[in-house]
Image (cartoon, helix red, strand yellow):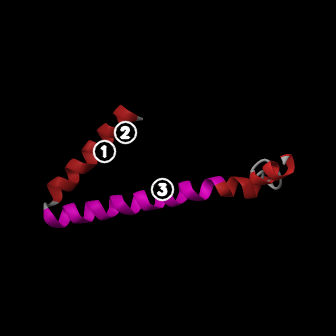
Amino acid sequence: MAEQNSKKFDRTLTEGPILKAVWKLAWPTMLQNLIAGLQGIIDHTMVGHLVGFAANAAIGVSWQIFLVVVV
């Protein structure tokens, strides 16, 4: 019974090559950052076309304030 329970747990992050373990943890974060960056580019493009240059400037200013307050 104990042998069956030990097979359920995946120990690939604690055993084996370190680069493989780091990659398993890093790729979802990299994908999320890529998607967030693309979303920002698309948002700026849409706002620029629909509202104008002043709205894009407002987004830039508000983003800087957000970074100072949150980060």
| Residue bearing the label numbered 3 | 33
Residue at horizontal 39%, vertical 63%? 38
Mark 3 or mark 2, earlier in chain: 3
Disc 3 crowd, CA 10 A, few/some/many (<14, 14-19, 20+): few
The majority secondary structure of the magenta stretch comes to helix
Q: Nearer the viewer, mark 1 or mark 3?
A: 3
Measure the C-alpha gap from mark 1 to mark 3. Answer: 16 Å
| Residue bearing the label numbered 1 | 63
Disc 1 crowd, CA 10 A, few/some/many (<14, 14-19, 20+): few
Q: Residue furthest right?
A: 3
Q: Place residue 24 in its image quadrant.
A: bottom right
| Residue bearing the label numbered 2 | 67
Q: Residue 5: which disc?
A: none
State the quadrant of the C terminus.
top left
Q: Disc 1 vs disc 3: Cβ atoms closer than 8 Å?
A: no
Identify which amino acid the numbered label 3 is placed on: Asn
Q: Mark 2 falls on what kind of element?
A: helix
- Indicate the position of residue 22 as horizontal and vertical percent values: 69, 53
Query: Could you tell me if residue 8 is visible in this image?
Result: yes
Q: Is residue 70 left or right of residue 32?
A: left
- Indicate the position of residue 43 as horizontal and vertical percent values: 28, 60
